[in-house]
Image (cartoon, grey):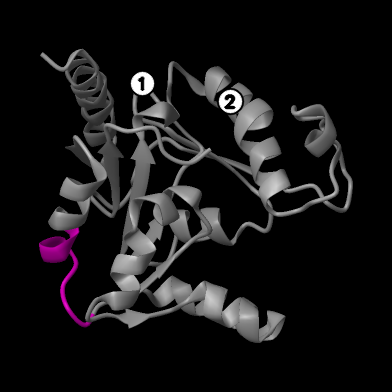
Amino acid sequence: MDVKNVYNTVIAERVIIGLEQAGFEGHYFENTKSMITFLKDFVPNGSLVSWGGSITLDETGVIEFLKKGNYKVLDREAAAAESQEKLMQLYIDTFSADFYFTGTNAITMDGKLVNLDGRGNRVAAMTFGPKNVIVVAGVNKIVANEQEAISRIRNCAAPLNAIRLSKKAPCVSSGKCEDCFDSGCICSYTVVTRRSPVKGRIKVFLIGENLGY
């Protein structure tokens, strides 16, 4: 018996019950490979797709899958390499996407998504615009409640992302949130998504692996 897999499945099923009661669509996959296989039939060819900045999307191969697929791609990395103006226009164009992919900083046991964002484009697209939002998350993002979610973000996800982005913020040195207002701060917007007002628009793909920060 794979004890970890049994445990992850039990926890994920509890979370999905909460998600679906709040209008989300929930799916659980034992591993990344099975999730990618599912995506091949789930996202129709020709769809306009984009994504938010996410280590989880990189680790799972979702971005590579989208770029190689038969999709119309709004590529944030390509736009950023061209100019800030192109990137800002892409953020706006993303609101018309058929599918928007993102990670999440935390998911509570009762099915809330909790996110802290720097510029706000990621949480903005989650809450409004794209026809479908697919949130990809490892089981390591599951926490008991909103309080634990905020603690996880402030003392784990935010410092790691600040280091990754080479930001000059106090958490880079201390390893925990210092509640700063420095120019390098990536903590501008805290958004708790407690329901999907358009039933099924936000789809949460939980994977039985530790992914992202």
Occupied quadrant, residue 178? top right
- Badge 2: residue crowd in 10 Å (few <14, some 14–19, many ≥20): some
Q: Quadrant of the N terminus?
A: top left
Above-or-below relation of 182 to 83: above
Instruction: Find disc 1 in the rendering and name its residue.
Output: 109
Q: Earlier in the sequence, mark 2 or mark 1?
A: 1
Q: Which mark is residue 152?
A: 2
Task: Residue at the far right: name it.
Answer: 182
Q: Is residue 106 left or right of residue 22?
A: right
Foreground pick, 70 / 88: 70
Instruction: Pinpoint residue 22: horizontal percent, then vertical percent.
Output: 29, 35
Instruction: Pinpoint residue 42: horizontal percent, then vertical percent.
Output: 15, 61
Residue at mark 2 to residue at mark 1: CA–CA distance: 14 Å
Q: Residue at x 14, y 56 (%)?
A: 37
Q: Residue at x 79, y 34 (%)?
A: 171
Q: Secondary structure at mark 1?
A: loop
Instruction: Pinpoint residue 91: horizontal percent, then vertical percent.
Output: 55, 73
Q: Is residue 183 left or right of residue 193?
A: right
Task: Give the extent of the magenta segment.
Answer: 39-46
Instruction: Pinpoint residue 99: horizontal percent, then vertical percent.
Output: 31, 66
Q: Residue at x 68, y 52 (%)?
A: 118
Q: Are marks 2 and 1 in contact (CB under 8 Å)?
A: no
Q: Is label 2 or label 1 in front?
A: 2
Q: Secondary structure at mark 2?
A: helix
